[in-house]
Image (spheres, rainbow, N blue to C red):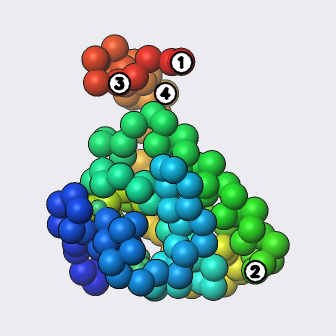
Amino acid sequence: MPHFVDPSPAGVCIFCRIVQGEIPSAKVYEDALTIAFMDLGQVNPGHVLVATKRHAANIFEITDEESAAVMQTARKVALAAKIAFEPAGLTLLQANGAEGGQTVAHFHLHVVPRHADDGVSFSWPRKEPGGAVLEGYALQLRNAMLSESVPVAA
Ligand code: AMP
Ligand code: ZN
C-alpha cells in the first residue's frame, strides 16, 4: 500500500519539479510530451515511471495526444527493459485517485519488469455476475460514451 501521498498542484508537485530539473531523477528518456525516469522504489530492477511533462493529475485530465505519447514512450522503455534486464514478463500499471492506488497526483504509468516469484501481487476479486449484468454494464458505458466529455474516434 502507498506510504505517502503527494496531492500538490501544477508546478510544485514532485513530478513537475523533476520535469523542471528542480529535484534530481535518474532520467531514461524525454520528448516533447513525456519524460521517463527511474522509480525511487524499484519494485524490480528497471522499474520506470513514464509521466506527462504537463501537470495533469490523472487519466481524466490528459489529452488524447498525451495519452498516445505516454503509451509510445512506455513501449520504448519496455523494449529497452527487455534488452537490459531480460525480464520473464513486464507489467504496466497506472493508478488514478487515492482509491485507485495513486500516491503522486501527476499522471504517470509504471513500467515494471517482472520475474517468476518476484513477490509482486495484485488482488483481483472476480465477481462473475453473468451475461445479463455484463450487457447492462456495456449499455451504461455505450450511453456514457455519447457524453461531450468523451472524445469521438479520430
Ligand atoms: P503511484 O503510487 O502510482 O502514484 O506511484 C508513485 C510512484 O512515485 C511511487 O512508486 C514512488 O516510488 C515514486 N516516486 C515518488 N517520488 C519519487 C521521486 N522523487 N523520484 C522517483 N520516483 C518517485
Ligand atoms: Zn505535476
Q: Is residue 124 left or right of residue 30?
A: left
Q: Which mark is residue 150?
A: 3
What x and y, as percent, mark residue 111? 58, 66
Marks 1 and 3, Cα distance to the nearest angstrom? 12 Å
Based on the displayed image, in which of its 4 quarters is residue 102 positioned? bottom left
Task: Tell me the kind of residue under disc 2.
Answer: Phe
Q: Residues within 10 Å of mark 4 (few under 14, many from 20)?
A: few
Query: Label 3's element?
Result: loop
Return the mark for residue 154: 1
| Lower position in the chain sequence, tag 4 or tag 2 | 2
| Element carrying mark 2 | helix
Mark number, residue 85: 2
What residue did someone put label 4 on?
131
For this view, does 8 lie left or right of residue 152?
Answer: left
Find the distance from the CA under tag 2 to the CA under tag 3: 38 Å
Q: Secondary structure at mark 4?
A: helix
Q: Give, as a three-letter code, the residue at label 4.
A: Gly
